Amino acid sequence: MTSHRAKLTATAIPLVLAATALITAPTASAGEAIACTHPSSSNKDADTGRLKGPNRASVPVHSGPAGSCSEVGRFAYTATAYYHCYRLNSAGNTWTHLRVDYAGDNDVSGWVWDEYLNDGGSIYHC
């Protein structure tokens, strides 16, 4: 018959090893570049948003959900953005895919870090 201590030890050792692996797993530091990916997006959100501010005149709109992705335009403080959906990038940050509606044919579509948005961005996952 197996003792309670043996069962507890057999259960505890894998848990301790798993916890140790989680604690020592490497993570991206703030200075490391995040790989630029171009995930799909779709217009799932009918909400709009604006920049947090007014301490920013504009922020970049990127081709993917990371600061290392190329800039495709700017989101001005005075403009309104039409949300589509959001993604979580490899650094653990959420980015909203959106369209900034400017007069004429100057609309800009792309990804903006949710930290820049007044309401935290889209609530719909892409």
Image: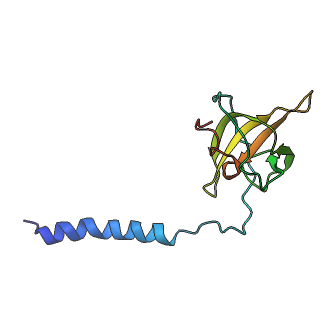
Q: How is the image coloured?
A: rainbow
Q: Is residue 90 left or right of residue 4?
A: right
In the image, farthest residue toward the left:
1
In the image, farthest residue toward the front:
54
- Relative height, residue 93 to residue 78 (above, below): below
* Residue at 64% in and 66% down: 28
| Location of the C terminus (image quadrant) | top right
Q: Is residue 49 left or right of residue 123?
A: right
Q: Position of residue 30 (x, y in %)?
A: 68, 67
Residue nearest the observer in this picture, 38 or 9: 38
Q: Position of residue 6 (x, y in %)?
A: 17, 70
| Location of the N terminus (image quadrant) | bottom left
* Residue at 27% in and 68% down: 12
Q: Is residue 71 left or right of residue 124?
A: right
Q: Position of residue 38 (x, y in %)?
A: 74, 43
* Residue at 62% in and 46% down: 120
Residue nearest the observer in this picture, 6 or 54: 54
Q: Position of residue 42 (x, y in %)?
A: 68, 30
Residue nearest the observer in this picture, 123 or 66: 123
How many marks overall?
A: 0
Q: Is residue 82 left or right of residue 120?
A: right
Please identify the quarter of the rendering in which residue 92 is found: bottom right
* Residue at 82% in and 32% down: 101
